[in-house]
Image (spheres, coloured by chain):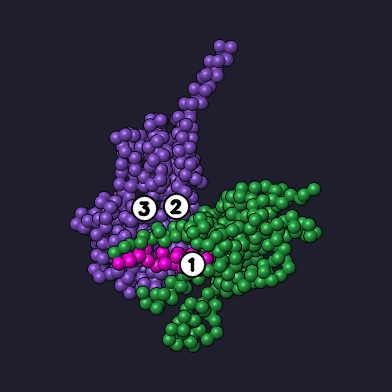
Amino acid sequence: MDFATVLQVLDSTVRLATPLLFACLAGLFSERAGVIDIGLEGKMLISAFFSAAVAAATGSVWLGLLAGIVSSVMLSLVHGLASITFRGNQLISGVAINFLAAGLTVLIAQDWFGQGGRTPSLIGQGRWGNITLPFANALSDVPVLGPLYAQLISGHSLLVYLGLLTVPLTWWILFRTRFGLRLRAVGEAPEAVDTAGISVTGLRFAAVAICGLLCGLAGSYLATGLQAGFVRDMTAGRGYIALAALIFAKWRPWYALMACLLFGLLQAVALRYQNIDLGGLTIPVQLMDALPYILTVVILAGFVGKAIPPRAGGEPYVKER
Amino acid sequence: MTVLKSLLGASAALALSTGAALADPALIYDLGGKFDKSFNEAAFNGAEQWAEETGGNYRDIELQSEAQREQALRRFAEAGFNPVITTGFSMSTPIDNVAGDYPDTKFVTIDGYVDPEEHPNVKSISFAEEQGSYLVGMLAAMASETGTVSFVGGMDIPLIRAFACGYAQGAKAVNEDIEVIANMTGTTPAAWNDPVKGSELTNAQISQGSDVVFAAAGGTGIGVLQTAADEDILSIGVDSNQNHLHPGQVLTSMLKRVDVATYEAMQAGEDLDTGTERLTLEDDGVGYALDENNRDLITDEMQERVDEARQAIIDGEVEVHDYRSDDSCPALSF
């Protein structure tokens, strides 16, 4: 494996990890506030559709992004309404959202565009262009660091850089602001937050709204960054891998970045090498595809450190009398 | 009372007999969906053509989940539709389960296989995909400048391997030293609808030197064709004619005439001959697409060579190995 190949695999890793990262951080906000969200997949999907549809109709990827985020936040609020306001089962509400998004996107797409649940191919301003960072071309002749900068760090779309910036931002919000402290508290001991006179419902709604926003970015990146349009079920289980990454990361932002990059790397390697030959031992590609889930189970089983979820996760808060 | 009874009975019998006389065909699309721009859409086009030409009616349904397969078959059979046409290899087992219960209904499975001895009312239609893929493989090898061509498959099943194997044989027939990279998207049905993965696979193949990529991957192929167009290499579509998706950048499409098969089954109606049928180059059951979108990409010389090979296959001078015959491929290792 030469240096150029390593760069290509890492480049692919960054592209594959970005939607996972957005979705994983989305889940992080929601679950840290005590609302379990397995509807990440559905929210990404609906955002992917609306961002592609609006970008196709208006020719502007920014309006598409806006539409994607709005649609995703709307679904988040539905989840919030069901599981916070009406204290329904959070898992069931999440599953319902996944089904709703899978059906709704295809139905609306067929009605609007008549192309079998697909949006027209986006061209020009309807897609995220790749940003070439300053000096990328000039530095590309420098050995090792040049290509590393020009190929790996430069030349991604805006959303990739935004995704990487979201990690420190999430850390700062959660661990350095008053809002973050309260948000974490509401996931651990909502009764304490309530006693302090702060609205549990309000905080949880804020958390699911942020979750919707981030899922919106993930969906928009899938449909208008990586692809040139929406195809039915195009998220292909990335919401679930993001959930696995969240557990793997033990609900921490920096670990989330690491977990998503690791899962992205596994995918990229699996895509580049179908079967890996390790001196007589052949690793089939299926194993690479399954590894994220296997690793998550290993973590959950407590073999490597311990993953402790927020204490009040999954439980609707009922005011004590 | 008796009068009423016989009246009712007569009208019921009338209703039943009119239902039987008008037995419309029914069509069940596989999970890829009716408008997949590919396999299922071809079946739809065939049915539409039949309806337009004969003024007949047909009913169709898009499956949403695995569980609906048997249910849809039974519903159509019980409602008196005949023949009931299905697309996709996954219908083999459901038809096997259902066909015995409705001996008077004829079932057609396109791409599937049901034992004709056991169920005499089933027709299994298969295609010589390896032959069509062989031709587009030749075109790919002739169009390639780097000496490397590639293949992206959807779900890893023998049918898709047959595509890959035919493609590799065709490419190697033109250029013995050509390198053929073959990748599968996955092993679950999600592999038919993952354009993001299709794009990444294509990028990986391009970085390995490929400059013509053949996608036999349903919705995943949309991502493959898109990336190929973005990166300025050539791509090859599948099943339906996909040349128009990126005019001038899709070298050709491997045609599988599901539309013809559907049309003919509907045309035959209740008198359909059952058993197994394999559509080959000779019946124009498979082939490659040539239209105004790719006219400039295919030179006269290329066309001549491919048409010669086509004739040679029909005459039996060239034999294209079918992966499904012995689960191995002489030109490609998986």
Quick check: is A266 in the magenta stretch?
A: yes
* Mark 3 surroundings: few (<14), some (14-19) or many (≥20) residues within 10 A: some
Provide the secondary structure element on which disc 2 rests.
helix
Q: Is residue B111 visible?
A: yes
Q: Is residue B56 visible?
A: no
Q: Earlier in the sequence, mark 2 or mark 3?
A: 3
What's the residue at 64%, 72% (across, down)?
A169
Can you say whether B236 is above or below B285 in the image?
Answer: below
Provide the secondary structure element on which disc 1 rests.
helix
- Looking at the picture, how far across and down is residue B258, in whole percent? 39, 49
User: Is disc 1 in contact with disc 2, using a CB cutoff of under 8 Å?
Assistant: no
Which residue corresponds to mark 2? Answer: B189
Find the distance from the CA under tag 1 to the CA under tag 2. Answer: 25 Å
Per the rendering, the colour in which chain B appears is: purple
Pick the front one: A18 or B12: A18
Pick the front one: B173 or A57: B173
Which residue corresponds to mark 1? Answer: A262
Where residue B157 is drawn, which disc sits there? 3
Quarter of the picture holding the N terminus of chain A: bottom left
Find the distance from the CA under tag 2 to the CA under tag 3. Answer: 10 Å
Tell me the quarter of the picture where residue B272 sits.
Answer: top left
The answer for which chain carries disc 1 is A
B222 relative to A190 in the view: left or right: left
User: Is disc 3 in contact with disc 1, using a CB cutoff of under 8 Å?
Assistant: no
Q: Which residues are magenta?
A: A259-279
User: Which chain did the image draw in green?
Assistant: A
User: Label 1 is placed on what type of residue?
Assistant: Leu
User: Label 3 is placed on what type of residue?
Assistant: Ile
The answer for which chain carries disc 3 is B
Pick the front one: B210 or B142: B210
A17 relative to A281 in the view: left or right: right
